[in-house]
Amino acid sequence: MKLTFRCIECSQKLNAAHSQVGSAITCPACGAVQAISAPLAPRFRGLRVAAGVLQVLAVVVAAGLIVTVLVAVGQGGSGQSVMDTVLQIGVAIPASLLAGLLIYALGEGLWLLIDLEENTRAARQLLELNRSERKSTPPGNPG
């Protein structure tokens, strides 16, 4: 089974074998060298699903709250003044949108943490690979 990932410089699609994990690959398009990292741990897959669910939930919550407010205002319209109706709509709809935005931001925060962990791990592997290459190259021999 192949690992598929993108070049860190030009986003070219690259493939590598599982046996190449921990080594470096050179991008054929731009020549950038990057470490081949192991696939994501199962815990990251769960976090990715959670982040996606939070983002969908944000839209559903915001839309549901807005519809609820509009229905409530419509049902209570006969006994309310116009000012009360405008106030309810003017406060409740922005509050609904804010609730949805906060939930969506939580999902985005999870995506950001996952990407940060992946990039940190890839940078650490590349640094270790560069250090091991420097140790294996004799002094005075550039390559």
Image (cartoon, rainbow, N blue to C red):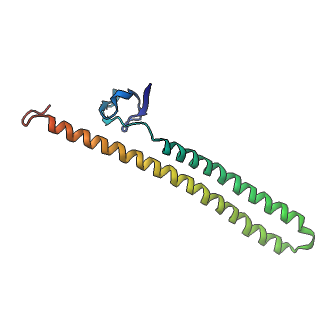
Among the 4 quarters of the image, the one containing residue 40: top left
Query: Residue 89: where, in percent of width, then height?
Result: 77, 67
* Residue drawn 16% across the image and 38% down it: 134
Looking at the image, the residue that sits furthest to the left is 140
Q: Quadrant of the C terminus?
A: top left
* Residue drawn 44% across the image and 24% down it: 1
Q: How many marks?
A: 0
Judge left or right: residue 63 versus residue 85.
left
Among the 4 quarters of the image, the one containing residue 78: bottom right
Task: Work out whether residue 60 or residue 46 is closer to the camera in this orientation and state it.
Answer: 46
Judge left or right: residue 55 versus residue 116.
right
54 above or below 139? below
Task: Work out whether residue 100 or residue 121 is closer to the camera in this orientation and state it.
Answer: 121
Query: Residue 141: where, in percent of width, then height?
Result: 9, 32
Query: Residue 76: where, in percent of width, then height?
Result: 89, 68
89 above or below 17? below
82 above or below 28? below
